[in-house]
Image (tube, rainbow, N blue to C red):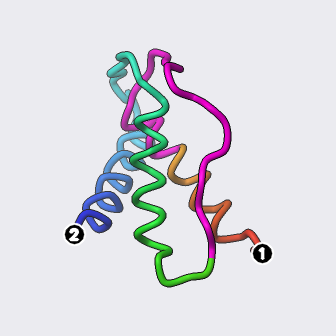
Amino acid sequence: AKHLRALINRLLTLADLERAGVESRARPIAIDRTLDDVLETLRFSYRASEKEISLRGNVKGVAFSGNEEIVRTIVSNLLENAVKYSRT
């Protein structure tokens, strides 16, 4: 259910991006929490595969201002494509 909800939210966010005049909802974003959430969803999606999904490096305390839904969608799409198209 969580994975399906994430997919639906991504579709709705992408629909907002494509629509003219997207309103900006900028607020502080803690990238470590965003990455943790996205990675948890990816691990769940790829749990049956032999691919290991992990984060290297330290992003704790890194924050910036932006639209969290859009950032989450972008990060999710990038990481999902990285996992999908990686050989190992």
- Whether residue 67 sits left or right of residue 51 in the image: it is left
As helix, strand or loop, the secondary structure at mark 1 comes to: loop
Amino acid on which disc 2 is placed: Ala
The residue depicted at 61 percent of the width and 31 percent of the height is: 58
C-alpha gap between disc 1 and disc 2: 28 Å
Front position in the image: 41 or 16: 41
Where does the image place residue 54, in percent across and percent down from the top left? 59, 55
Residue 44: x %, y % from top left? 40, 69
Note whether 65 is above or below 15 in the view shown.
Answer: above
In the displayed structure, does residue 69 sit left or right of residue 62? left
Residue 87: give its label: 1
Residue type at mark 1: give it.
Arg
Residue 36: image quadrant is: top left
Rendered location of residue 43, percent (x, y): 47, 65
Of all residues shown, which one is farthest toward the right? 87
Q: Could you tell me which residue is drawn at 38 percent across and 31 percent down?
A: 68
Query: Is residue 69 placed above or below 40 in the rendered structure?
Result: above
Residue drawn where x is 37% and y is 37% of the image: 69
- Residue 39's x, y, as percent? 48, 54
Q: Which mark is residue 1?
A: 2
Is residue 52 highlighted in magenta?
Answer: yes
What range of the chain is rendered magenta? 51-74
Quadrant for the N terminus in the image:
bottom left
Image height check: is 40 above or below 74? below
Q: Please state, as top left, top right, bottom left or bottom right, where the C terminus lies in the image.
A: bottom right
